[in-house]
Image (cartoon, rainbow, N blue to C red):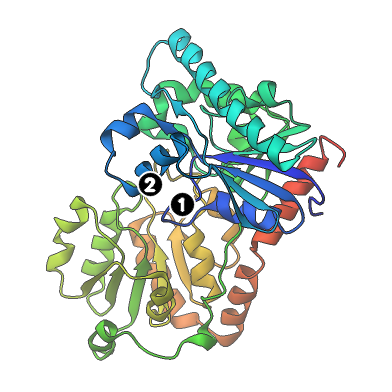
Amino acid sequence: MLIKDQDIIVTGLQPWDIDIGSNCKNIALEFSKNNRVLYVNAALDRMTLLRRKNDPKVQKRRRILHGAEPDLIELAPNLWNLFPKTLLESINQIKSDRLFDWLNKINNRRMAKQILSAVARLGFKDYIIFCDSDMFRSFYLKEMLHPKAFIYYTRDNMIAVDYWKTQGIRVEAAMMKNADVVVANSTYLAKLAEAFNPHSYYVGQGCDVSIFDRTLIDRIPEDMKPILETGKPVIGYIGALKTLRLNISVLQHIAKERPDWNLVLVGPEDENFKDSDLHQSENVYFLGNKTEPELPLYLATFDVAINPQIMNEVTIGNYPRKIDEYLAMGKPVVATKTEAMSVFADYVSLAASAEDYVSMIGKELENNTLAKIKEREEFARMHTWENNVINIGKALRKVISL
């Protein structure tokens, strides 16, 4: 059941002008179809101001601080974006709990003041706060803004990352406990949240797969043509090539064990990938970063798509949106077996080892059918942002009446 006719304040880690895709922005857009929504950017902090003073986005925020540009912008009907007209203290790495909490409360007061100013101008009443993992800047907003409901959204195991560990382990647990409801985009993260709040629910993941449609493919990318001319099956991956998230040894094993397959990797590389011996393998092709509209063209050439995710605290609860994109194109998929991947178990081969990857890819190559292609497409297209927001509404209604 959709949330309708409400005023919603969205706070999070990612500002509206971020250059990459954002769950929070997609959810806010979906909220705004039936509600009035204020999307609050993260405020500028002193360290960012010093280190990135030449960044155009930082310069824009400085102009807003000095009143040279408006702090509240209408993005679309029912959707506004607030650039908080304040400067926060940089406190993430403070080790003293008492000092951190004291400064964090000051930061929250500054944020609350700016949000209340925008709320007054927009005439918001009895609002809901949707907080996207903003465990520090939004920690005290429930007590300072008095919303009728406070939703905490967890979509990554943030506290597994060094940047968040110092205070995040303690603070996020307290924030989840204090929230009216916690919603998660993976079953793994929902179970973690249940330890702190019994009103914690898996709400799925939205994904816009409209461009990942095999009927729209009208050409083959030029750099794929010589690869296809070899006649070997194409085993492909699309996404950032980072050893924090990908198991490079799985890729090395596939390339070595099956020289009769071509391994195609589409995306930017970190230094570990650039230095790896994969670059010396004749059947491995690094095609670099591509624009989003180009990605379906490359995916269309794959015989099997893979996601060799490495198992660590950062990735174990991650919902990989690329799986929906792979399936929306009807592609056979082999991915690392994690608890979060259990929702794909009927449509994806889940590998527990490098050897599993080789055997499962072989089986997928042999057993692909038109019926399976259509089943994958239909399943992926169920994971819409509308359904994601419907599930958030269902979770909220378990604790309050709307």
- 276 relative to 398, above or below: below
- 265 relative to 147, above or below: below
- Please give the label number shown on residue 57: 2
- 121 relative to 171, above or below: below
Is residue 27 rendered to the left or right of residue 401?
Answer: left
Q: Residue at x 42, y 68 (%)?
A: 360
Q: In the image, residue 100 lies at what x, y percent?
A: 45, 15
Q: Residue at x 73, y 25 (%)?
A: 146
Q: In the image, what residue type sits under mark 1? A: Asp
Q: CA distance from mark 1 to mark 2?
A: 8 Å
Q: Residue at x 33, y 53 (%)?
A: 246
- Furthest residue to the front? 68
Dividing the picture into quadrants, the one containing residue 253 is bottom left
Q: In the image, residue 115 lies at what x, y percent?
A: 62, 33
Q: In the image, residue 217 lies at what x, y percent?
A: 46, 87
Query: Mark 2: few, some, or many residues within 10 Å (few <14, many ≥20)?
Result: some
Q: Residue at x 35, y 43 (%)?
A: 59
- 250 relative to 52, above or below: below
Question: Is the residue under label 2 in contact with that under label 1 (CB below 8 Å)?
Answer: yes
- Please give the label number shown on residue 44: none
Dividing the picture into quadrants, the one containing residue 265 is bottom left
Dividing the picture into quadrants, the one containing residue 232 is bottom left
Q: Which residue is mark 1?
A: 17
- Furthest residue to the top? 98
Q: In the image, what residue type sits under mark 2? A: Lys
The residue lying toward the viewer, choosing from 129 and 56, is: 56
Q: Secondary structure at mark 2?
A: helix
Q: Secondary structure at mark 1?
A: loop
